Amino acid sequence: MPTNTSNTRLQVTTLPQNQAQQPLRLLVSSLSLPTHPPTPLPSAAGHRHSQPSRRDCPKLNSDPDFNRSPGKSDHACPSFLDSTYFDRRAIVVELSTEYSQMAEIMHSATVGSDVCQNGSVKNLESLRSAPDVDDEYDFSNWRRGRRGLSMHENSRAIDLIESFGSPGRIRSGFNTPTSSNVSVEPHPMITEAWENLRRTMVHFRGQPVGTIAALDHSVESLNYDQTGWPNGKADLEIVWVSCMVPSSIQFPAALRLSEPLETDVKVFVRDFVPSALAFLMNGEPEIVKNFLLKTLRLQSWEKKVDLFKLGEGVMPASFKVLHDPVRNSETLIADFGESAIGRVAPVDSGFWWIILLRAYTKSTGDSSLAERPECQRGMRLVLSLCLSEGYDTFPTLLCADGCCMVDRRMGVYGYPVEIQALFFMALRCALVLLKHDDEGKEFVERIVKRLHALSYHMRSYFWIDLKQLNDIYRFKTEEYSHTAVNKFNVIPDSLPEWVFDFMPLRGGYFIGNVSPARMDFRWFCLGNCIAILSSLATPEQSAAIMDLIESRWEELVGEMPLKVCYPAIESHEWRIETGCDPKNTRWSYHNGGSWPVLLWLLTAACIKTGRPQIARRALELAESRLSKDNWPEYYDGKLGRFVGKQARKFQTWSIAGYLVAKMMLEDPSHLGMVALEEDKQMKPVIKRSTSWTT
């Protein structure tokens, strides 16, 4: 048998080792398999592995080197190999302790061009085209002593992939990794944020399609499901290296098959929005375009939860990029709520998709994407779900708990303000993007009618200021006929005590929910900021919301911006509303937690209302801690003083939200991507924010 060697590029993963004497285990993705069962070999630990079958070996007939007669020689296992086996569709080579360090691992600066950031190979041929070395090589030197593996933290492919920004575009004056020609040194926190954001990028078949939710590998993946490794191990370090492998060594002789490995990463639709805006503002629209098209394709999937089929227009809550390292193939798998907590479909995903499509069009000046037939059809499908006529007597959308950013049971069922504001903004964006052809005209007419009804309803019944609060306090009940003032029959005694102290003399906001005999007076940041950006709030109401934030700074901002809702529910109310949810305890997570991602929404609202000083003040608070605390997902406590109990570190949308806020303050023209001017035709009949002029 020839004794030549070849330089083979391998994907190597060092698995966590609890003891120094444990064997080194290498994850290898570019080995071929023999056409006959290998000689059984017990591992060092005494484990027995099953024999590989032809069905599990995709390359059995593709490699002529292995198409030899089975009787010519028995493939003895090399002495330094304890065992090799398949572990969930990846080949794991386990070296014995004595020889665990004899492999020469060499860093390759060119590996980044061949490897995607999600661990996939862009070009399989590059794995097989490494130059040959001398036919004669003295491997006896391997036994003379152990040599350390020269693996470095900065050898990860995600640190080597070059930026793909569009040259020549304005990037808000920041010296980001794609604008290194700018001579001015950026703030260290901005550089760090961009580096972290780029590490989260997910590729599908060589193209960037989104970002993962978090880079935190210090804890299990919780509900993010970021990897497909056994036992939920999210702390595996994938390192791409070049490794000298002698072809005379019969690796397949020791191959055993067990459960196949499928590494995967997940992209959440709503989580990607701030990342998309950051890339657009930095002149990098490619990843946003790919994301829009990939999620659009997933929309056409048949959607079932158990035996029930969802509407055709539902957009996914998230999608996975499933990577098979053996077959070098990638697949997208969508989640429409069947894997979510509570099994609730994401109502907001379709709205965010339309809003992001409009942001892409506004940023690039390229309307060709929105004009594609598939994009036009995608918008119409989303709108068909929302504009359909039914039993509702209100223009607002009826939703279940957990259908939006507040994705757990938190008492937002009914008509949550976040969904209504996003619905309004998506309708206005679609009005601009839809073609006025035969199919588009019908939707345009329905959109205009719904916008008028929705704006009147929200401005009249969801808006509250000191005057309106006093009116509700004096409401009569059990009123019939169209002349009723208390149209929802709200009982004044149901008003919470805190709202009387919370409401300032100047200021107001859209309350969390309005439905028969129920008004949720909680403040929800996202819904109110989107109301300003979409012009659902009138200029007077927008100014009143800003007045409220300034007046109640300690409550709504505290020591870390920004409260997702206020106040927290606790005690008996917490047990009833959340079902005793241990994650949503008072002043934690969605129950009064502080979320840095909301910075970009606050900043955009501040710029639109001419109050940038509020955003600067909030950003100063964030900059004092965000980087030091490793970019957590959320903060706990009444003032947002503590890193969240279950908060993920290096949370992508915390990083992206900060960058978007900084870039908008530096270049306010970016606001046009996410803000709409007031439509003069939708002037409300009733204005209840008169307190702002006092």
Image (tube, helix red, strand yellow):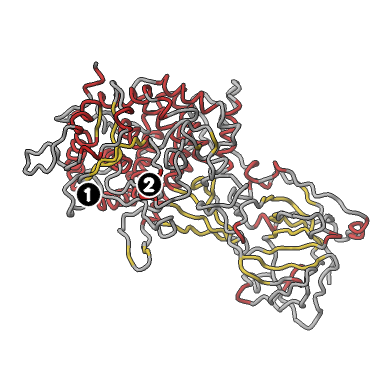
Q: Name the residue located 31 percent from the left edge and 23 percent from the top edge.
A: 504
Q: Is residue 335 above or below residue 425?
A: below
At mark 2, the secondary structure is: helix
Q: Nearer the viewer, residue 354 or 342?
A: 342
Viewer-nearest of labels 1 and 2?
A: 2
Quarter of the image that includes the C terminus? top left
At mark 1, the secondary structure is: helix
Which quadrant of the structure image shows residue 191? top right
Q: Amino acid at mark 2?
A: His
Q: Is residue 87 above or below residue 437?
A: below
Q: Nearer the viewer, residue 592 or 435?
A: 592
Q: Nearer the viewer, residue 209 or 616?
A: 616
Q: Name the residue located 18 percent from the left edge and 48 percent from the top edge.
A: 442
Which residue is the site of mark 1?
Answer: 387
Q: Amino acid at mark 1?
A: Leu
Q: Position of residue 666 (x, y in %)?
A: 47, 22
Which residue is the site of mark 2?
Answer: 572
Work out whether mark 1 precedes mark 2 in sequence or the reverse, and give the earlier one: 1
Q: Position of residue 409 (x, y in %)?
A: 38, 50
Q: Judge left or right: residue 596 versus residue 233.
A: left
Q: Residue furthest bottom?
A: 71
Q: Residue 543, which numbered label?
A: none
Please rate how many residues cluster around mark 1, counting C-alpha atoms within 10 Å: few if below 14, some from 14 to 19, many from 20.
some
Q: Name the residue located 74 percent from the left edge and 55 percent from the top edge.
A: 17
Q: Position of residue 342 (x, y in %)?
A: 40, 56
Quarter of the image that includes the N terminus? bottom right
Q: Position of residue 554 (x, y in %)?
A: 43, 26
